[in-house]
Image: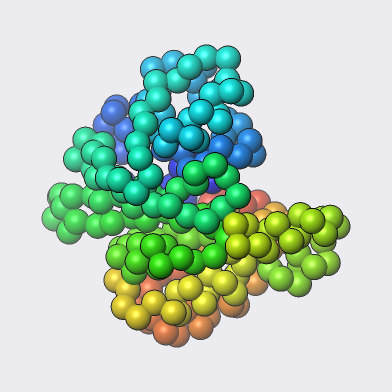
Amino acid sequence: MAGLLRLPHGLRLPHPRHEQFRQLLLITHEHSDHCIGLAALLRQNPALKVFANRETARRIQGSLKVKPDWQLFETGTTFELGRLQVTSIPIPHDAADPVGYAIDCPAEDGRSARRVTWLTDLGHATDVVRHHCALADILVLEANYDDEMLDLSKRPLHLKQRIRGNHGHLSNHAARDLLLGLREWQTSELFLGHLSKECNRTVLVDEVMNAVRQHKGDLRVTVVDPLEDDPVSTW
């Protein structure tokens, strides 16, 4: 679920064993297909702290029978989670107030400080999005659909137009062009995710991203397959 911030397999934040990091949830936006699991999580853990901006929380609360322990923030601000610093990033998507996240992880156990940035569900790359992509050490970026597969799909025309719109999703080529357009970027690990099960395939993402691999030879690229539990393509 892209709306409930879940890290791809192999991507870990500091202190995964600490209880405090099992007691919180970061939400990106309110679309039902992205936060449908929230009610079940709250049944399992009523004390769960749920982080969202005010408008997203308001939209989600209307569909819940219980009130979560909302931790509200203003979009664009930075807040602390233990030793982590989390910055909410405004993104262009057809939701009330959608965000991505940049998570600054402190140096520990001989490992240098790193920034993990999560950007999915965005129709185009704004200057703010480009800025945060360039600063990420580990970047999770959407590569949602292949243009030809979307054209050939049985989805209605209005949905195809929505997906392709400025507040829809990034195609494989749009994600590639975003990355190639960065003048300087420090990313060492790239996770390409939120692939459409109907309108994309990992092999197509691999092919398109060859240009990025050639442009930045020290970049490790993983394509996260929506049909599998684990990534299936890693350079």
Where is residue 143 drawn, in percent x and y?
57, 63
Q: Is residue 88 above or below residue 183?
A: above
Q: Is residue 114 left or right of residue 5?
A: left
Is residue 122 among the parts visible in the rendering?
Answer: yes
- Residue 26: x and y in percent read 41, 37
- Specify whether 232 is left or right of 7: right
Q: Position of residue 65 (x, y in %)?
A: 58, 14
Please give the name of the residue rendered at 41% of the width and 29% of the height, measured from the top-left corner. Answer: 50
Residue occupying image coordinates x 21% and y 35%? 82
* Quadrant of the image occupied by residue 49: top left
Examine the image and state in which quarter residue 195 appears.
Answer: bottom right
Residue 182 x, y percent position in the rendering? 39, 77
Any part of residue 188 in sight? no
Front position in the image: 8 or 233: 8
Is residue 193 shown above or below 1? below
Q: Is residue 108 left or right of residue 208?
A: left
84, above or below 208, in the image: above
Taking the spot 52% from the left edge, 75% from the top edge, the residue there is 176
Task: Tell me which residue sits at (39%, 20%) in the image.
Answer: 69
